[in-house]
Image (cartoon, rainbow, N blue to C red):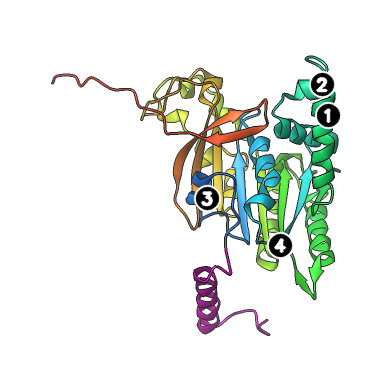
């Protein structure tokens, strides 16, 4: 570490060249998500020391995406050694685990609770077997709401505790949701909290090999009637739609806005008029990809299985040109 607060140009070149060489030789790689389209928007996945912000209105699938990334993380990244630290403020650990079991056996949450017919002994046995395999995975959960300061302190302690010979272990840190962080004594509003969160994650990701996955709400402006009319640009999610948009945007390496057009009865999505024939269609607007490409990708949700899958880009409605 440099004894000064600055680095020479030479040091920057050395770090960059070593990184490129490591990636070229396969010694360094990005963290893979379950979806090639998602990975392709970044640098063949999510680079370590990154912050991902995913925003959407309630019921669009924010938690579903986060859960599937974590659930499949070790399978998708078998050669990488890492841990997971989840800040789960929206639901209790039991509910989160039930949703995971639901995805494993492909049955609805209500079925898992024997609320739509009694759960079979065979399915319960499958859950026990899955739990035996997963229970010792390096995943930890914080379910007590905290302030940004407490969040930061917890991450610091976690990274120090799980260091090997003084070197912190790579860690995925998730936050579900940013707005559920408690307001600190010196913060006058939730907006202050979001600004402080942005500064905290940037400081932490520069210090440690962390990927932050932060779930965020969208402003109610996206529900305006004029934004729900077929074929309007307003159908699309914008960076300004995020709660505390500027506060998180400047700190995010990847920012994704979610939309389920069918929720607003939109059948021709945006000025490109993509035909929405399935109510399960989920649109991911990659609004910022610091080291990748902005784009719009389409997925199909399976809430009954707590999962989603890639789909082909829908066809577009044909227009008849008016004669001038």
169 up-or-down from 12: above or below: above
**What crowding class fits label 3: few (fewer than 14 Cα within 10 Å), some (14-19), or many (20 or more)?**
some
* Residue ID at (57%, 59%): 30
181 up-or-down from 98: above or below: below
Q: Which numbered disc flags the more N-terminal residue, 4 or 1?
A: 4
Residue marked by disc 2 = 119
x then y, percent, for residue 153:
82, 59
**C-alpha gap between disc 3 and disc 1:** 34 Å
Callout 1 secondary element: helix
x then y, percent, for residue 320:
23, 19
Task: Answer whether residue 92 is visible to the viewer in this image.
Answer: no
Callout 2 secondary element: loop
Q: Which numbered disc flags the more N-terminal residue, 3 or 4?
A: 3
**C-alpha gap between disc 3 and disc 4:** 19 Å
Image quadrant assignment for residue 169: bottom right
Q: Which numbered disc flags the more N-terminal residue, 3 or 1?
A: 3
x then y, percent, for residue 309:
56, 35
Magenta extent: 1-29
**C-alpha gap between disc 2 and disc 4:** 36 Å
**C-alpha gap between disc 1 and disc 2:** 7 Å
**C-alpha gap between disc 2 and disc 3:** 36 Å
Q: Assess whether mark 1 and mark 4 are in contact (beta carbons under 8 angstroms).
A: no
Closer to viewer: mark 3 or mark 4: 4
Q: Residue furthest left?
A: 324
Viewer-proximal residue, 241 or 319? 319
Image position of 17 (left or right of 182): left
Residue marked by disc 4 = 81
Closer to viewer: mark 2 or mark 3: 2
Residue marked by disc 1 = 124
Q: Which numbered disc flags the more N-terminal residue, 1 or 2?
A: 2
Residue marked by disc 3 = 39
**Any magenta on residue 2?**
yes
């Amino acid at each position: 570490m440099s004894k000064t607060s600055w680095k020479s140009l030479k040091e920057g070149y050395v770090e960059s060249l070593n990184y490129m060489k490591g990636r070229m030789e396969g010694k360094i790689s990005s963290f893979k998500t379950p979806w090639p389209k998602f990975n392709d928007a970044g640098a063949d996945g999510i680079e370590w020391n990154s912050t991902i912000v995913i925003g959407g209105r309630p019921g669009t699938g924010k938690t579903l995406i986060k859960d599937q990334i974590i659930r499949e993380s070790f399978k998708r990244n078998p050669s990488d050694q890492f841990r997971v630290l989840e800040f789960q403020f929206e639901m209790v650990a039991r509910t989160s685990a039930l949703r995971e079991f639901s995805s494993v056996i492909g049955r609805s949450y209500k079925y898992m609770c024997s609320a739509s017919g009694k759960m079979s002994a065979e399915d319960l046995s499958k859950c026990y077997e899955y739990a035996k395999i997963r229970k010792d995975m390096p995943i930890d959960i914080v379910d007590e709401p905290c302030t940004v300061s407490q969040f930061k302190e917890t991450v610091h302690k976690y990274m120090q505790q799980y260091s090997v010979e003084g070197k912190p272990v790579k860690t995925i840190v998730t936050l579900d949701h940013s707005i559920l962080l408690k307001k600190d004594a010196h913060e006058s509003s939730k907006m202050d909290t979001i600004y402080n969160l942005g500064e905290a994650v940037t400081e932490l990701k520069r210090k440690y090999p962390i990927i932050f996955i932060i779930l965020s709400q969208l402003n109610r402006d996206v529900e305006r009637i004029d934004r729900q009319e077929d074929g309007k640009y307003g159908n699309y999610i914008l960076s300004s739609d995020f709660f505390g948009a500027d506060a998180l945007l400047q700190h995010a390496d990847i920012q994704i806005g979610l939309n389920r057009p069918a929720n607003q009865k939109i059948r021709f999505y945006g000025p490109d008029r993509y035909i929405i024939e399935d109510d399960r269609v989920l649109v991911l607007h990659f609004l910022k990809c610091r080291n990748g490409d902005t784009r719009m990708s389409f997925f199909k949700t399976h809430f009954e299985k707590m999962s989603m899958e890639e789909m082909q880009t829908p066809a577009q409605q044909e227009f008849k040109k008016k004669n001038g």
